[in-house]
Amino acid sequence: MSADNLGELNRKHMNDVGESAFKQQWIVDLGNQITAYILAHLEWLGTPPNKTEKPMKLLDYACGNGLISKALLPHVSTIRGIDVSDKMVDLYNSPARTNNADMSAIQADLLAPTDAMLDALIKGEYSDFDIAVTSMALHHFADPQLMLTKLVERLAIGGRILVIDWANEAVADWPAEGVLKEAGLGDVRHTLNDSVFTEKSVVELLKGAGCREAEFVLCPETSKLPGVFGEKRLFFGLGTK
């Protein structure tokens, strides 16, 4: 499937589910698990204990409602988000979430053609980041290698990229969409690529994207999902430009 088509399918899906997606208890628990791991490994990520120690700029790609941004807000000076869904961007930019912080998002898809104005914005304000994070989105990208390459391009030299997703998962093995919908997961299979993310493939993706160093770490605890899925395990992939 083309990047345009898969990006548009994801945009429509997230616009349809809106904020309700983040109210499901398993998603709340998953978000808490991800942010707890990140906050416990700030040194690994290259993030100072507080934003006054060293000004840092964060790119949150596929930012959703701002889970990662809010978790790292006390530790970085500037945060810019990008999401394919305009509904997610509206949630991210709501005053209650930004709280007058230097934190804002735009609707865009780095894999889709852009007009001159948007391209200039992304290459200007949306560049020279110290950290880029994309969480639970790699399996939604039509071309994971190209997407990571575009994100690494936006890092400053020495900057780091953190990728979070399910380890060793094949979409081909997932239940049919009807079963997923009955389990409260919605119609999601059509928004996914067919990649399987192993330690070898993630390290290769990060190095292929322009990282001189790459690491792959499995989350110590499994994540509990609704019935048909049982338990899965997250990975955290870290690359340094």
Image (cartoon, rainbow, N blue to C red):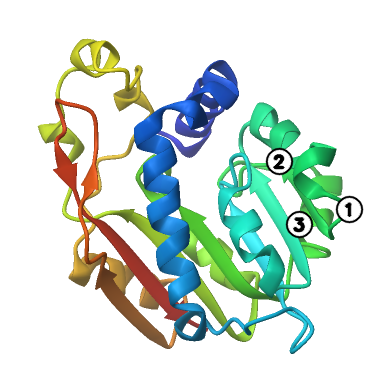
Is residue 11 toward the left or the right of residue 28 in the image?
Answer: right
Residue at 75% across / 43% down in the picture? 97
| Residue on which disc 2 sits | 92
What residue type is disc 1 on?
Answer: Asn
Residue at 46% across / 68% down in the picture? 38
Is residue 210 toward the left or the right of residue 77 in the image?
Answer: left
Q: CA distance from mark 1 to mark 3?
A: 22 Å
Badge number at residue 122: 3
* Residue 73 percent across, percent down from the top left: 69, 64
What residue type is disc 3 on?
Answer: Ile
* Residue 232 percent across, percent down from the top left: 19, 47
Q: Nearer the viewer, residue 39 or 132?
A: 39
Q: Is residue 60 above or below residue 23?
A: below
Q: CA distance from mark 3 to mark 2?
A: 18 Å
* Residue 178 percent across, percent down from the top left: 22, 10
Q: Nearer the viewer, residue 61 or 142?
A: 61
N-terminal-most mark, 2 or 1: 2
**At numbered mark 1, what does the secondary structure look like: helix, strand or loop?**
loop
Q: Are marks 1 and 3 in contact (CB under 8 Å)?
A: no
Q: CA distance from mark 2 to mark 1?
A: 12 Å
| Residue on which disc 1 sits | 100
Q: Quadrant of residue 188?
A: top left
